[in-house]
Image: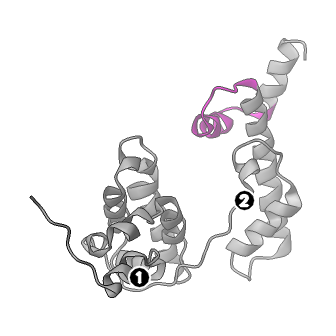
Amino acid sequence: MATKKATTPADEKIEKQDFPLFDALNALDRKDYAWFDSLSEEQQRKFVAFMMIKYMSYLKGSSALSAYYVMSTDVNANKYFFNEYVSKHPKLQWLMLCASSPGKGKQFHPWLPQIKEKVSLLKEHAKASEIKEYFKKIYPSNVNDSDLKELADAYVEEHKRKMYLANKFPSMKIADIDLLSQLVTDEEIKQYEKDFGN
């Protein structure tokens, strides 16, 4: 019969330690596939994959390296993270994040601000002023105000189309609405409404 291993106060302190976020980011930058196994069970339980995707995909550095991190994180991790099988395996998610890294050593990953959840979930209309503020935080300081306004206006217009589609097809997944909104034009929506007497 197996006996329970005696623990010291030091062991208990390590067990209760929070997830070491910045050590995790450094390990990802190094492509350290084994790092996840070095965590205690408690720390592994505190691993939040979605948060790590957000941190991993955003990088302050050269534009080429920043672009690589965004694209690689999307292709190697984000694309499958919420698959019903993958989402049950944090270690597999860790390995996918490691695969996203080019292995160039420690990088600076600032927190990427988020658009309001109700806006992202198509439950509330996007406001141009809030979207402009969001873009101001994520784009470099040399992007001028008129470009930010143009980006925000374009986002709001696309969001209106998505909101329309979400209301017309409430059982459709957001990913499908995103795709459909790129295939359908505003003119086609107007014609659709006209054809059905709306």
User: At 36% across and 42% down in the image, what residue appears?
Assistant: 85
The label number, if any, that marks residue 115 in the structure image: 2
Q: In the rendered view, how is the structure colored?
A: one colour
Residue wearing tag 1: 23
User: At 79% across and 27% down in the image, what residue appears?
Assistant: 189
Region in magenta: 168-186
User: At 70% across and 49% down in the image, what residue appears?
Assistant: 120
Q: Quadrant of residue 161?
A: top right
Q: Is residue 121 left or right of residue 147?
A: left
Above or below — where is 198 with respect to 135? Answer: above
Q: Is residue 171 left or right of residue 64?
A: right
- The earlier-in-sequence mark between 2 and 1 is 1
Give the quadrant of the C terminus. top right
Above or below — where is 190 with respect to 114? Answer: above
The number of discs equals 2
Above or below — where is 104 with respect to 73? Answer: below
Residue 171 position within the rendered picture, expressed as x and y whole percent measured from the top left: 64, 26
Give the quadrant of the N terminus. bottom left
Q: Nearer the viewer, residue 28 or 181?
A: 28
Q: Is residue 51 magenta?
A: no
Name the amino acid type tagged 1.
Asp
Name the amino acid type tagged 2.
Ile
What is the residue that sits farthest to the right in this orientation?
198
Q: Nearer the viewer, residue 153 or 42?
A: 42
Residue 7 position within the rendered picture, expressed as x and y whole percent measured from the top left: 27, 79
Q: Is residue 169 magenta?
A: yes
Q: Secondary structure at mark 2?
A: loop
User: At 72% across and 32% down in the image, what residue appears?
Assistant: 166
C-alpha span from label 2 to label 1: 27 Å
